[in-house]
Structures are given as C-alpha cells and as structure tokens.
Image: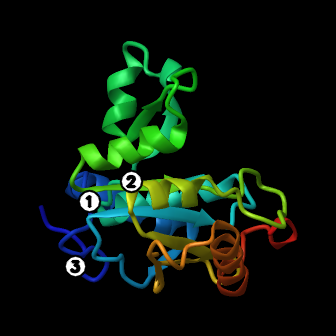
Amino acid sequence: MKLNNRVVRPSTPKMGNAFSRFMGSAVLKLLGWKIVGQLPDEKKLIILGIPHTSNWDFIVAMASIQAVGLRVSYMMKKEAFFWPLGGFFKWMGGVPIDRAQKNDITTQMADWFGENDNEWLGITPEGTRKKVKNLKKGYLRIAKAANVPVAVIGINGATKEILLPETIWEWSEKDFNIDTENKAIKAYADKTFTGINPANG
C-alpha cells in the first residue's frame, strides 16, 4: 500500500487504500486545508484533537485521517455495536466501552492497549465546542495506566492547517502529577493552535 511517507512513519497504525486516501485528500483540497508536519513514530499513542470549536472539526479530521491512511480508534458505548452496524463501527476504529462493568473506563482502555500491539486512541478532551478552562483528565488516567504516551494534533483555523505533533508527553512514576500535566498540555494547545471558531477556543 503506497502511503504519504512525508506524514506516516513505520510504526504508524494504517488503514484504507489508494481510493480512500484520494477521497480524503480531495475533500481537504476542496475545503482549502493542508496537513503540516509528520506523525510520531509510535506503536501505541493517545492522540488529543484540540481545539474543538466547530462542527467542521469532525469533517476536517476525518478527511485528514483518510488522506494519510491513518487508523485512529475511539471509544463508544457498547450498546451502539448492534447488528448490522457493530462490525462497521469496529472496522472504523470503534472500541466498545461497558459503562456498567465493574472495571472503570480507565481499566478497560488500559486492558485494550495491553491486548493490542499497534493502536492509537483519539480523544477530544474538551468535551464541548465551547471555551473551557481545563481539559477533562480521563486521557491522562488512561495514558498512565496503560503506560502510553500522549500527543496533540491541532488545527490553525486562520490558515486552514492541520498541525501534526512535535511534542510527545511521557512520564515516569516519580514525575507524574495529573493536574500539572493537564495544565501543561492545555497551555501548549492554547499557545500552538487556533480553532475554526476562535470565540469558542
């Protein structure tokens, strides 16, 4: 499978084909967006999508993922995985979460990372399109429990650029403080990215 070697790396989880990459690239070109940078060379990673200020974010994100042939998984409640859609959701990267299970989401996702060799999990930690002071910290709990690094893919709405991560966050047992790290990542995102609707970001 021929991929965009300027973006993907040997360890990048991949999916799709030449047609899906063509379609993703065509949508980005039609909308006037471009991808800047290179994906991390990580087999396991939590990717944060920031900032989330518009309904267009999803369209741009999905087109970008298809354009470079990247596989990104995401959490969904298990009730959504009914026939005949269950197989499609899993093929698209959906990970069923059992909210009634005695194991919490952090444990479930740590187990999921442990059972898979090459997976990236996408999370939107703002949880809303409105301006937030703090990011929700669930992604850090999962990252720490699964011993998986975190990176941020963001956008510059003014220049219509999807900015791939230059910084990877990793932690040792001694230096991890969830509040400190969450504030640092939020500060990095605020400094680096601008939403499509800046009033919400």
Classify residue 119 by image quadrant. Answer: bottom left
Secondary element at tag 3: loop
Q: Earlier in the sequence, mark 3 or mark 2?
A: 3
- Mark 1–mark 2 contact, CB under 8 Å? yes
Residue 85: image location, x then y, percent: 40, 21
Residue designated by label 1: 13
Q: CA distance from mark 3 to mark 2?
A: 18 Å
**Which residue is drawn at the image coordinates 37% and 15% (left, top)?**
84
Horizontal side, residue 7 vs residue 94: left or right: left
The quarter of the rendered structure image containing the N terminus is bottom left
Amino acid marked by disc 1? Pro
* Observer-nearest of 105 and 121: 105
Amino acid marked by disc 3? Asn
Classify residue 26 by image quadrant. Answer: bottom left
Residue 70: image location, x then y, percent: 32, 60
Horizontal side, residue 125 vs residue 148: left or right: right
**Which residue is drawn at the image coordinates 77% and 55% (left, top)?**
129
Residue designated by label 2: 72
